[in-house]
Image (spheres, rainbow, N blue to C red):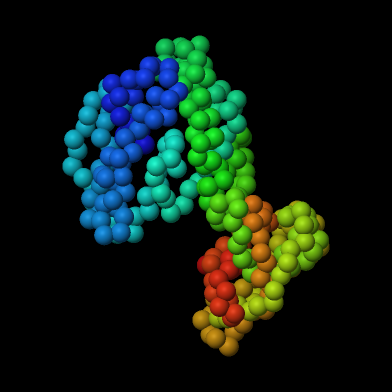
Amino acid sequence: MDGFHNPRAIRHRQGRDSADGYYLDAYDFEAFSRLVLEPLGPGGDRKYRERIIDLRSDTPIEEPPVLAAEDLVLVVDGSFLQRELVWDEVVFVDTPFEVARERGTRRDAELLGGLEQARRAFDQRYHAASRHYLAEVGPVDRASVVLGNADLANPALRRIGGPADAVVNLFSYGTLQTPSVQVEHFGRELRGVQDVLPGYRQDWVTITDPAVIAVSGTDRHPIVRHTGDAADTTAGTVLEVTTAELAAADLYEVDDYRRALVRLGSGVDAWVYLAVG
């Protein structure tokens, strides 16, 4: 979103240190929607603009549109993105304020006139505006993916698959049906309904992750592969899980598996872990 800031005269019209000025005036969401989201959306011509301003020089930029590939996936990063815009997926990168302040002030000290000036700007403008956004919009609960970012070397997947109050179906044909595994990874035993996965044949994989082996009690886990043959079916259980629990399931499954959305024999759609490749 840096290329879709408003000009400085608009960004700073409520004062250079104004939190409301940053929250309400920093970004030109209307131009971003018109020049990026609409042409890349349904019925659009795929001709979008990459930026409209050079932020450092505060100079408007008139560049020709870029033609997007038909299979392009647009990923946008920036502040306050859930305030006005609607997205297919939202990844909220959750960083504690004290950690973000330390990173941001070191990064922007030269740009903002020194370390003390940067600290003041973060306290009075940027983070004050961010607290307003969190309180008014509730972006963490609305996001479909939440990633803990306190430790850059070890990001933590906290939730995936929908907003905080969502419940999703997870089809398990293996160790996630075991109550002890459920309690270890979800903190509770899950309710389940028997179902089948048509067009898939069960196979076996040897697990090497000692943590997974310790919880499941075995290094031999089932895995299913797509055959497309209706005669091949895999029996299992449909479990109702929260999006936080789906994230915990993702962390439990090793790299031999990938999660995909499938239609079960009952007609219910559910997530399932399939063989990679």
Q: Where is the N terminus found, in terms of image quarters?
A: top left
Q: How far across and how far down the image is residue 148, in percent?
A: 60, 40
Q: How many marks?
A: 0
Question: Looking at the image, can residue 256 be seen?
Answer: yes
| Residue 213 visible in image | no
Q: Residue at x 68, y 67 (%)?
A: 239
Looking at the picture, how far across and down is residue 210, in whole percent?
Answer: 76, 54
Up the image or down, 54 lies above or below 92; here it is: above
Q: Quadrant of residue 191?
A: bottom right
Residue visible at 51% across and 16% down in the picture = 119
At horizontal 48% and vertical 27% (from top left) the residue drawn is: 129
* Residue 254 percent across, percent down from the top left: 65, 58
Please say if 271 is above or below 183.
below
**In this rendering, position of residue 38 left or right of residue 225:** left
Question: Which image quadrant for residue 209?
Answer: bottom right
Left or right: residue 101 compared with residue 14: right
Q: Residue 14 occupies which quadrant of the picture?
A: top left
Give the answer, above or below, for where 3 lies relative to 17: below
State the image coordinates of residue 18 (x, y, percent, origin top left): 42, 20
Task: Residue at 77%, 61% (x, y): give it.
Answer: 189
Extreme residue in the bottom direction: 231
> Farthest residue in the front direction?
136
